[in-house]
Structure formats: structure tokens, C-alpha cells
């Protein structure tokens, strides 16, 4: 009988834990995206982190600013909207104020649902772009998961906004559309700046740029294409949205 050594079965790589993927997104993002590409597609951890941080910010605004004040500020910072409010009958002004308040508060409160919808839509757009224009081989689920992790730097803006609110910001100066000093627009007066320019300056946000870089890397890795293709796909769409947003703000403002 032959004495042949029995070769041990190759161990299956268990991949990274979700906590490892979360920490790596800030230090070694390629490791996170390579792990996703291998088929480890759990995404609830980054989603949960973003929800918790988002609701901390929501609580801060509720306690320190108040959503009625948020609505008043939103109207005041839009000269055309404020002019329409001043010309409207009292009953209509009250109704407009309530609708603005409920819509703004409801949109922030419903952020978990909005986040999922936004991730699904953006994943679909990027999936089509990277596969059909750059010959990628990504699947929709891998793009979706990569996006969830790539969005994590956004919690920094929410945390900074929470700190600013609790640090004693005057409620009358709070701007729900630009609540943290993470972009050029935060250092401009929206009432004294051209609306289009203010919109463009607000889009130059360090957390946004950080996120876009991560999305570009993630999309390129899971699709098996060059990083340059990921950057072109992601920043191309971002540039289109920024220009469209600035144009719309200039027209409506």
C-alpha cells in the first residue's frame, strides 16, 4: 500500500468582514472593492452607519434649529421665493410655509428610503455606462455594493454639520442645503452671490470629491477596466449634473 501524503484541501478565502471593508474604505479602498468583486456583497453595514449618522444630524437640527426655522431660512435665501411669499395673501403664506417645512423635514426623515433609491438609480446609470461605453463586466449588484461603501465619506459632512449646530450656530443663518464648511459655497453669502455661481461653488465639496474618487476606483475594479475609465464615467456624470444644477439655479434664482 502506498504511503502518499494526503494534500490538505485548499482553504476558501473568507474575505473581509464588513468592519474591515468599512475601515479599508478610508485607508486602503482597493482592498474593499477587490473583496466586493470576489463576491462578498453585504452592504448593510455602511448603509446602517450612514442612517445612524444622518439621524444624529436630524436630531441636532430638530433640537437646536427647528424645522419651521429651517423652512423660513430656505425661503429667505431664495429672493424670488421670498418675493412671492411677501406678495401672497396671509393664508397662502401660511400654507406655503407649512408645505416647505413638512417637505424639508420629511425628506430628511425619509433619508433611508431616499438613499436606497438614489443608490439604485446611480448604480443603474454607472452599470450601463461602464459596461457599454468602456467594455466593463460589472453586474448591477456589485456596482450597488461598491457605491454603498464609496459613499461613506459623506458621514463626515453630517458629523461636521452636527458639530456646527451644537456649537451655537445662529438658527437664522442655518442653511439646510449647505450646512457644513466642506465646500466653497459655505464661505459665500447666498443672498449676495449669483445663484449659479453659488450652486457651482457648493458642488466643489471635499467630501463629494473624495466620494467621487472612491466611486471611480470601485466601479473600475468591479468592472475590470482601467481606473481612467472609472474616473471618466463618474466625473463625467458629475460634471453634467453640476453644470445643469448651476444653470437651473441661475434661471430660478
Image: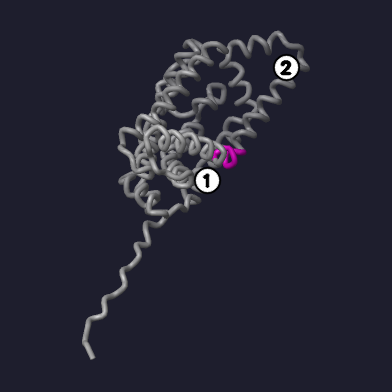
Residue 132's label in the rendered image is none
Chain part drawn in magenta = 110-115
| Occupied quadrant, residue 206 | top left
Magenta span contains residue 111:
yes
Which residue lies at the image location 41% right of the left edge and 41% below the top edge? Answer: 150
Q: x, y percentage for residue 181?
A: 42, 27
Quarter in which the N terminus is drawn: bottom left
Which residue lies at the image location 57% right of the left edge and 42% below the top edge? Answer: 112
Asked if 44 appears above or below 209 in the picture, the reply is below
Q: Check disc 2 and report the residue beneath it.
A: 93
Question: Magenta part mainly helix, strand or loop?
Answer: helix
Q: Check disc 1 and report the residue beneath it.
A: 52
Left or right of 26 on screen, residue 186? right
Magenta span contains residue 146:
no
Asked if 197 appears above or below 186 in the picture, the reply is above
User: Going from the N terminus, do you reach mark 2 or mark 1 first?
Assistant: 1
Residue sticking out furthest to the bottom:
1
Q: x, y percentage for residue 185?
A: 44, 20
Amino acid at each position: 500500500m502506498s504511503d502518499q501524503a494526503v494534500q490538505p484541501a485548499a482553504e476558501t478565502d473568507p474575505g473581509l468582514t464588513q468592519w474591515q471593508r468599512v475601515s479599508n474604505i478610508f485607508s486602503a479602498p482597493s482592498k474593499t472593492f477587490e473583496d466586493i468583486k470576489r463576491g462578498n456583497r453585504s452592504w448593510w453595514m455602511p448603509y446602517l452607519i450612514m442612517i445612524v449618522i444622518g439621524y444624529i444630524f436630524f436630531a441636532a437640527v430638530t433640537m437646536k434649529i427647528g424645522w419651521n426655522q429651517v423652512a423660513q431660512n430656505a425661503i429667505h435665501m431664495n429672493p424670488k421665493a421670498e418675493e412671492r411669499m411677501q406678495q401672497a395673501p396671509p393664508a397662502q403664506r401660511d400654507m406655503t410655509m407649512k408645505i416647505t417645512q413638512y417637505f424639508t423635514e420629511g425628506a430628511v426623515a425619509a433619508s433611508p428610503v431616499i438613499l436606497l433609491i438614489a443608490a439604485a438609480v446611480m448604480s443603474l446609470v454607472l452599470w450601463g455606462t461602464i459596461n457599454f461605453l468602456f467594455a466593463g463586466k460589472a453586474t448591477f449588484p456589485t456596482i450597488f455594493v461598491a457605491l454603498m461603501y464609496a459613499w461613506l465619506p459623506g458621514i463626515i459632512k453630517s458629523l461636521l454639520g452636527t458639530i456646527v449646530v451644537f456649537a451655537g450656530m445662529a438658527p437664522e443663518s442655518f442653511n439646510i442645503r449647505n450646512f457644513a464648511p466642506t465646500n466653497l459655497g459655505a464661505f459665500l453669502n447666498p443672498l449676495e452671490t449669483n445663484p449659479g455661481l453659488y450652486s457651482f461653488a457648493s458642488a466643489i465639496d471635499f467630501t463629494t470629491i473624495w466620494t467621487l474618487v472612491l466611486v471611480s476606483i470601485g466601479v473600475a475594479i468591479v468592472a475590470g477596466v482601467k481606473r481612467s475609465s472609472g474616473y471618466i464615467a463618474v466625473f463625467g456624470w458629475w460634471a453634467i449634473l453640476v453644470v445643469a444644477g448651476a444653470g437651473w439655479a441661475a434661471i430660478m434664482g
